Amino acid sequence: MKPMFKTLLLSLPLVACGGSNSGKTPVSQEPDTDYSKLSQAKIEPGPLRQASASELSELIKNGLRVSLRENQSYGMMIRETAVINSDNTLDSKAGGNFSGTNVQVAGVDEADHVKYDGSYIYLATPTEYTETGPKASLKIFATDPATASVNEVSETSLDTKHWGDVSELYLVNSAQGTSGLATIRRSWDFIAFTDKVVNDVTSDGKPLVVDEADKAISADIWPYQMDNGIEITLYDVRTPATPAKTWTLSIDGNLLGTRKIGNTLYVVSSFVPAIPTLNYAAETKEAKIANEQLIAQTQVEKLLPEYSINGGSAQPLTGANGCMVPASTEKADGSLALINITAINLATQQLVESVCVNGDVAGIYSSTKNLYLGGSDFSKWDNWQSYTVLHQFAFANGGIDYSATGSVEGTLGWNSPSFRMDEHNNLLRIITTNYGATGEPTHQLNVLQKVSGRSELSVIAQLPNKTRPETIGKPREDIYGVRFNGDKAYVVTFERKDPFYVLDLANPTDPKIAGALEIPGFSTYLHPVGDNYVFAIGNEANDNGFAAGLKVSLYDIRDPANPAEISKHILGTAYSWSSALYDHRALSFLQASSDQLRITLPVSLYEEIKLPEYSTSRWINESLFQFEINGLNSGKVSLDLVNNLVSENNLQQEYPLWGGNDRGFLHDESLFYVHGPKVIGASWYPPKK
């Protein structure tokens, strides 16, 4: 793996793409330092093609040249080798009915900082900042659903010198149950600079002289950024009291997202190539020539991401011939945007394959068959104000194969872009937003199909259209929530009221708006309950469109033309908040019976205090709210509040110590509430007083 860099925080470089000639510049010929004809590559519609090593080399080097031209700098860098340790990896077979991580697509697992297998809860604790530095650990709790009890059986400290706390966890399964735990960590974004400066230079390329007093002061004032890295570690937890580290994989780049199907983990990462000794402040002719010579003489292999296993020697993640670029890439294009999709078999502890794509990612969606990368560009293309390019990759033999590319008008938006995409019956449905010249949003649904024998996703239907001109959302209303469910889709738009739309997608070539319901407030997460109901969480709103408390509600869509809100609950005041508003993993669902669905969501509850001159708020508690949807068999359906399990309240302290990462796991008649570094066990129904 490449050594890491500590970097002075200046502006980050642009990304772009193209070219040829990766050889050395002859000494007798003065290098060309006029970069005015180079172009910053954009996200391009059209299929991808394999780039040659020379093309990829000049594509990246032109990206560096564009960055120099725009005077965008990484700053002064220091090489520092990452310390990565290795050891030994995970078995439990659970009975009963229990909940796991709430995911978008059944069969496609998503990471979370806590996992439950029915016998043990695996928790990556939030980082605590102590006098001796940051502290993070992995905890394993044994659960007993018969008594609603929980017991901590082990705690494993994590090294936080180069890596932060665990951002993601996955379980590794065997025939006997859970056999392993995979942790995923990112390198720290910011590191205090304390080491000797070895590459600091002035604008004319001469060494920068800094006395020890100034250096000591700058160490306290200036934060430094470390090159991004990803660490994937496997633990054996077949004996939960003594988990053992067995395997570590480190990858250059920034983590964009992960998915897991079976025991194959798919990691999507981005990498920005850099030459640490480039002088971005170069102004003299000599300094510019020195920069160009350095770029021309650098081998392309030195500009590509690498990986290492168990702290061993660095190996290329993909070779110089292993990257795909848009077919329209030209010689004068430059780009510093490399995306990798890496397939890892967690059961066999192997990196299976990594596919490189030049581009950008604004949303990741995975079905059980394909992975989609969406990239949005606000530049005009033909008569469009903005557009989104979608790359389809097929899961094949544990690896990934590039399949096709398509493009649609609009962007994937700011809220949960993955939920705007869905694959059904080999068709991709996507909802995008075009903000136009005035900034007013317009929304459209597109249905795409792969063209037989070609690397193309073709649009076969769009809504609205000439035949069905009704818009999705009223003027100025943006999209707050989207959920696809088979032959239907549900969309929530909002400005002052919440139009809840039901889209009929049964005929993929003729989608239509089946019905709409207008009510106060808005929903940010929609959860289908079979084919007849939708559970939603969002905010209640007043007549002026301002939030007036958390709202959980239940929609009846048995008659799609006339959707109805049949139950709702308002929690707290305008200041109350839940991580479930924008993180679907914070919600838990358990089908307790064919007649009943149980739901938990964490809430940070606030009350409003009105004073003579103004209003303020006061925190009440951190708690896990418990709901039931009852009557699913009888048709007399209701959304009922059961209880809220409190973890912290204002009788103990003025503000919460933990919040924002709470989870609930339901198991038979028991509930396990994860709050900060601890787990609280309780019966689903509170004891009668």
Image: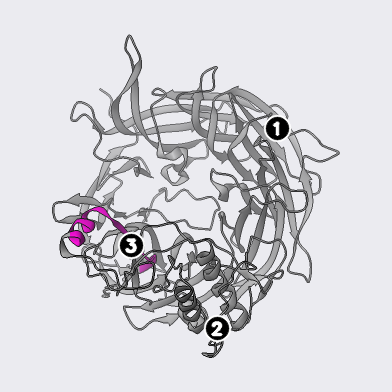
Q: Amino acid at mark 2?
A: Glu
Q: Is residue 327 magenta?
A: no
- Determine whether 278 is above or below 293 in the image: above
Residue 65 at x, y percent in the picture: 54, 70
Residue 675 at x, y percent in the picture: 29, 43
Measured Cα–Cα span from mark 3 to mark 2: 68 Å
The one nearer the camera, 15 or 638, is 15
Query: What number is the disc on residue 30?
Result: 2
- Determine whether 47 is above or below 689 in the image: below
Q: Amino acid at mark 3?
A: Ser
> Would residue 679 be found to the left or right of residue 586 on screen?
left
Residue 493 at x, y percent in the picture: 62, 33
Which residues, given as a range, are shown in magenta? 214-232
- Going 52% across and 35% down the picture, which residue do you hit? 595
Of the numbered discs 3 and 2, the one sitting upstream in the chain is 2
Measured Cα–Cα span from mark 1 to mark 3: 44 Å
The one nearer the camera, 240 or 561, is 561
Image coloring type: one colour
Residue at the spot of label 1: 560
Of the numbered discs 2 and 1, the one sitting upstream in the chain is 2
Query: What number is the disc on residue 92?
Result: 3
Q: Amino acid at mark 1?
A: Pro
Rendered image quadrant of residue 323: bottom right
